[in-house]
């Protein structure tokens, strides 16, 4: 088969790869129905995260089970399944506590931007839908593999509650779906930090009540002004830079909470600032597997439509253009169809 390989900065190729196959009795082989480019894929694409060898790309996936190992019990060939970007056994102490992305046997899924994918630890990683979905539902189901699950975790980590004020720092796919998550959780006011007109429009569609274009000191001042000097109850940080984290901390009221899910790059915390801010920090790689059953149910019943975050759809063999479009902010998120 052909799949996506990153050779170096801005060098994405769609080339011949070995067909995946069952290696361990706990594996499953799935035929990809849809995959996509993640914002985190742009870090190595831009050369910020260095790679030392040609690297198969992609960690968001959904599709039809083709074959399972002899020990797989919870999914079977013919079922439509979704899995997390981290595989997990879903039985270790960390998994039982709801942190499957810290599973003692975790592995990061590689090579999902391809027609077929081997998924290790299938019983603990994959969740089947009630039946095979319509073509129209697949983009929304795909988001549950990472960005919707990550946005949801950001809202959970930030302790979003009904009627509370929420600020979302970051207008990429995760930030936008964090807005959708906060809306589902009953937030009374959702302030989206965004300078991009297309993203502002989708933010409002997902539930944002206010838009703030300012960043840094200007953005913090505007949040304080809008909250009568208090700050937000909950802040979702979905970028991962020093500026975004500092802005999140300074925008949160004493006693408030920050859910940080942007992969950190160059972020350093000021102990004095954090100590006297009285804010809670919680985040990390989202334990998507914890949320999959409930999020599948929300999509299945038509209560959420996170697939709207895809504003560019391309055939899988045009994956390089998908990367370029996101890198140049011509697209929020690229959907790839094998």
Image: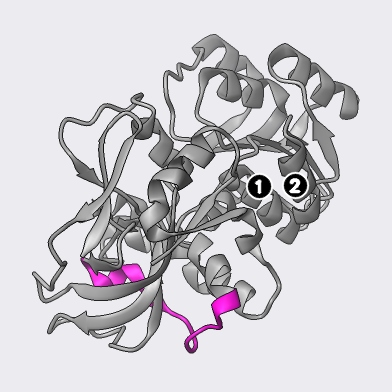
Q: Is residue 296 above or below residue 279?
A: below
Q: Is residue 234 above or below residue 74?
A: above
Q: Is residue 187 above or below residue 276?
A: below
Q: Residue at x 28, y 61 (%)?
A: 88
* Residue 197 location, quadrant: top right
Q: How packed is label 1: few (under 14 Cα within 10 Å), some, or many (20 or more)?
A: many
* Residue 45 location, quadrant: top left
**Callout 2: SS:** helix
> Which span of residues is magenta-colored?
120-136
Q: Earlier in the sequence, mark 1 or mark 2?
A: 1
- Pick the front one: 151 or 283: 151
Where does the image place residue 129, in percent across and percent down from the top left? 47, 82
Where does the image place residue 76, in percent across and percent down from the top left? 29, 87
* Residue 77 location, quadrant: bottom left
**Callout 1: SS:** helix
Q: Judge left or right: residue 47 versus residue 303.
A: left
| Residue denoted by label 1 | 176
| Residue denoted by label 2 | 203
For marks 1 and 2, give the CA distance: 6 Å
Report if residue 123 lies within the magenta region. Answer: yes
Q: How packed is label 2: few (under 14 Cα within 10 Å), some, or many (20 or more)?
A: many
Q: Judge left or right: residue 163 versus residue 9.
A: right
């Amino acid at each position: 088969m052909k799949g996506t390989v990153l050779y170096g900065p801005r060098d994405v190729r769609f080339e011949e790869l070995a067909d995946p196959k069952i290696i361990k009795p706990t594996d499953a082989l799935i035929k990809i129905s849809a995959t996509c480019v993640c914002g985190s894929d742009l870090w190595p694409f831009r050369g910020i995260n260095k790679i030392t060898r040609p690297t198969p790309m992609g960690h968001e996936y959904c599709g039809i089970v083709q074959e399972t190992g002899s020990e797989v019990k919870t999914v079977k060939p013919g079922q439509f399944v979704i899995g997390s970007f981290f595989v997990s056994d879903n039985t270790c102490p960390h998994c039982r506590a709801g942190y499957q992305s810290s599973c003692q046997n975790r592995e990061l899924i590689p090579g999902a931007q391809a027609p077929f994918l081997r998924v290790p630890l299938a019983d603990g990683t994959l969740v089947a839908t009630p039946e095979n979905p319509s073509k129209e539902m697949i983009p929304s189901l795909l988001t549950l593999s990472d960005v919707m699950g990550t946005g949801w975790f950001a809202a959970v980590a930030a302790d979003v509650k009904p009627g509370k004020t929420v600020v979302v720092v970051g207008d990429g796919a995760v930030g936008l779906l964090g807005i959708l998550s906060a809306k589902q959780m009953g937030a009374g006011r959702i302030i989206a930090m965004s300078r991009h007109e297309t993203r502002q429009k989708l933010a409002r569609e997902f539930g944002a009540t206010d838009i703030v274009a300012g960043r840094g000191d200007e953005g913090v001042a505007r949040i304080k002004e809008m909250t009568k000097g208090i700050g937000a109850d909950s802040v979702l940080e979905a970028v991962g830079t020093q500026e975004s984290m500092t802005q999140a901390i300074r925008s949160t009221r004493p006693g408030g909470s920050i859910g940080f899910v942007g992969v950190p790059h160059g972020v350093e915390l000021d102990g004095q600032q954090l100590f006297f801010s009285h804010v809670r920090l919680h985040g990390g790689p989202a334990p998507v597997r914890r949320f999959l059953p409930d999020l599948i149910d929300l999509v299945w019943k038509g209560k959420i439509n996170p697939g709207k975050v895809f504003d560019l759809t391309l055939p899988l063999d045009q994956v390089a253009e998908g990367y370029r479009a996101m890198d140049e902010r011509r697209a929020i998120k690229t959907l790839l169809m094998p």
